[in-house]
């Protein structure tokens, strides 16, 4: 910067006018975006179905639906080793936790319809 010249009066440099992209493969990112959006919407609908089914009086089916959803997310994590939007820790941890949680829900699902103790 020359003496007496202010930063806002300088003409912009050519490299500052170029669009900045951080993704080296923008076409690949465009293909993945609808897939990610669809998956997030499907998971949200599946999760919203659990309390809806329970409110309709089918509590055991709601628990089984939640277990099936968790198990399907664990299977997706097995198939996608590079990490997805549902990856929390390592692949082995995510799959083990998902299968374990689904198994516990399946084992405890018969107790959902027990009468209330007063």
Image (cartoon, rainbow, N blue to C red):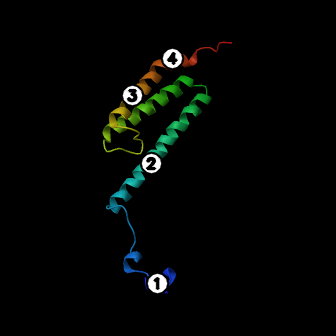
In this rendering, the label closer to the viewer, 1 or 3:
1
In three-dimensional space, the C-alpha distance between marks 2 and 1, rounded to whole angstroms, equals 47 Å
Give the image quarter of residue 69. top left
Q: Mark number for residue 110?
A: 4
* Residue situated in front as seen by the camera: 116 or 17: 17
In three-dimensional space, the C-alpha distance between marks 3 and 4, rounded to whole angstroms, equals 18 Å
Q: Which residue is mark 3?
A: 99
Residue at 49 percent across and 46 percent down: it is 41
Contact, CB < 8 Å: mark 4 with mark 2? no
Quadrant where the N terminus sits is bottom left
Pointer 3 or 4: first along the chain: 3
Contact, CB < 8 Å: mark 3 with mark 4? no
Pointer 1 or 3: first along the chain: 1
In this rendering, the label closer to the viewer, 3 or 4:
3
- In this rendering, is residue 38 above or below 95? below
Q: Which residue is mark 1?
A: 10
In this rendering, the label closer to the viewer, 1 or 4:
1
In three-dimensional space, the C-alpha distance between marks 2 and 3, rounded to whole angstroms, equals 23 Å
Crowd band around label 1 with a 10 angstrom C-alpha radius: few (<14), some (14–19), many (20+): few
Give the image quarter of residue 97. top left
Q: Mark number for residue 86?
A: none
Contact, CB < 8 Å: mark 1 with mark 3? no
Q: Label 1: state its secondary structure.
A: loop
Q: Which residue is mark 2?
A: 38
Pointer 2 or 1: first along the chain: 1
Residue at 51 percent across and 26 percent down: it is 63
* Residue situated in front as seen by the camera: 95 or 53: 95
């Amino acid at each position: 910067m020359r003496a007496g010249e202010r930063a806002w009066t300088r003409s912009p440099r050519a490299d500052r006018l170029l669009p900045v992209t951080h993704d080296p493969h923008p076409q690949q990112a465009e293909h993945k975006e609808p897939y990610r959006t669809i998956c997030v919407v499907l998971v949200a609908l599946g999760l919203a179905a659990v309390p809806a089914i329970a409110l309709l009086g089918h509590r055991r089916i709601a628990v089984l639906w939640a277990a099936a959803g968790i198990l399907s997310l664990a299977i997706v994590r097995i198939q996608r080793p590079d990490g997805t939007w549902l990856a929390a820790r390592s692949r082995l941890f995510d799959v083990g936790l998902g299968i374990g949680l689904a198994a516990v829900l399946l084992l405890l699902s018969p107790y959902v319809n027990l009468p209330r103790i007063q």
